[in-house]
Image (spheres, rainbow, N blue to C red):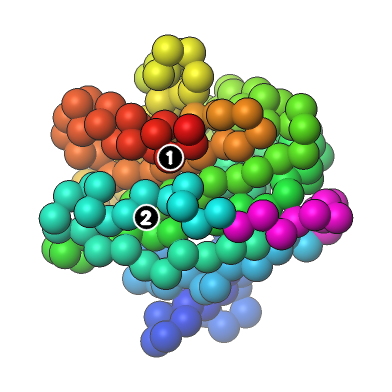
């Protein structure tokens, strides 16, 4: 996984000029970087990852609009290309990237961050298209990485994941709870909606909205975008 040592646009360095700071999965990284006072740099392709010959898929219509989250959200620019796999966890002692091969068979991806008006943690949506047969394998890879990295410590915090619903949306996806317990600040909870349709996998992460109904409503909109 790519690790970030400094932010962009004025974000501070994390841990000094020479220290490289590993972070949580990409879908949680904005929460961690925000808590650390850092900013996320522009994403790029993962070094060393197999690149498919047709990695040009870029259907932006698959991404939710900010209005679908509520009136207090604004959307960032949509990004295309191949970001790091959303579930890479290089800080987990049991994580080995080669154990999750589906990420190397992506044909393209689109992603967007969403920012609440109060300046709190962002939401994130990424939709990945896979070569035939690999989207289903990707969801299995997600299950396996959650089993191996269900709980671990990172940078003085405790990270945990649990599957809330293993057959979410009539068996088509996963509803996942991610938590970060900090020593000197309140815990952070983020929910993840993972849905597959054909050769596409959509992962939407949202800071705890305090209601299962809100999560289900957003999941239904994500599902509708996938078709």
The residue at the point 27 percent across, 56 percent down is 66
Q: Position of residue 102 (x, y in %)?
A: 75, 36
Image x and y of residue 59, in percent: 56, 54
Residue at 22 percent of width and 54 percent of height:
67
- Quadrant that contains the N terminus: bottom right
Number of numbered discs? 2
> What residue would you read off at disc 2?
31
The residue positioned 14% from the left and 63% from the top of the image is: 118
Q: Is residue 66 above or below residue 36?
A: above
The magenta span reads 48-58
* Quarter of the image where one finds residue 149: top right
- Disc 1/disc 2 C-alpha distance (Å): 25 Å
Position of 139 compared to 51: left or right?
left
* Magenta residue check for 201: no
Count neighbours of disc 1 (C-alpha within 10 A) and say few if under 14, some if 14 to 19, many if 20 or more: some
Circles 1 and 2 in contact, beta carbons < 8 Å:
no
């Amino acid at each position: 996984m790519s690790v970030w040592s400094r932010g962009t646009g004025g974000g501070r360095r994390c841990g000094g000029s020479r220290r490289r700071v590993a972070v949580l999965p990409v879908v949680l990284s904005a929460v961690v970087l925000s808590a650390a006072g850092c900013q996320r740099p522009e994403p790029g392709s993962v070094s060393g990852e197999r690149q498919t010959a047709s990695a040009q898929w870029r259907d932006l219509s698959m991404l939710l609009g900010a209005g679908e989250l509520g009136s207090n959200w604004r959307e960032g620019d949509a990004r295309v290309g191949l970001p790091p796999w959303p579930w890479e966890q290089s800080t987990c002692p049991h994580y080995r990237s080669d154990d999750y091969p589906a990420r190397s068979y992506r044909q393209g991806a689109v992603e967007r961050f969403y920012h609440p008006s109060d300046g709190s943690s962002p939401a994130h949506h990424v939709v990945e298209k896979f070569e035939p047969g690999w989207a289903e394998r990707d969801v299995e890879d997600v299950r396996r990485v959650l089993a191996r990295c269900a709980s671990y410590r990172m940078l003085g915090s405790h990270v945990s994941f649990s599957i809330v619903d293993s057959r979410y949306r009539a068996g088509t996806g996963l509803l996942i709870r991610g938590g970060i317990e900090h020593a000197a600040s309140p815990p952070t909870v983020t929910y993840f909606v993972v849905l597959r349709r054909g050769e596409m996998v959509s992962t939407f992460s949202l800071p705890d909205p305090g209601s299962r109904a809100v999560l289900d409503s957003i999941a239904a909109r994500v599902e509708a975008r996938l078709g």
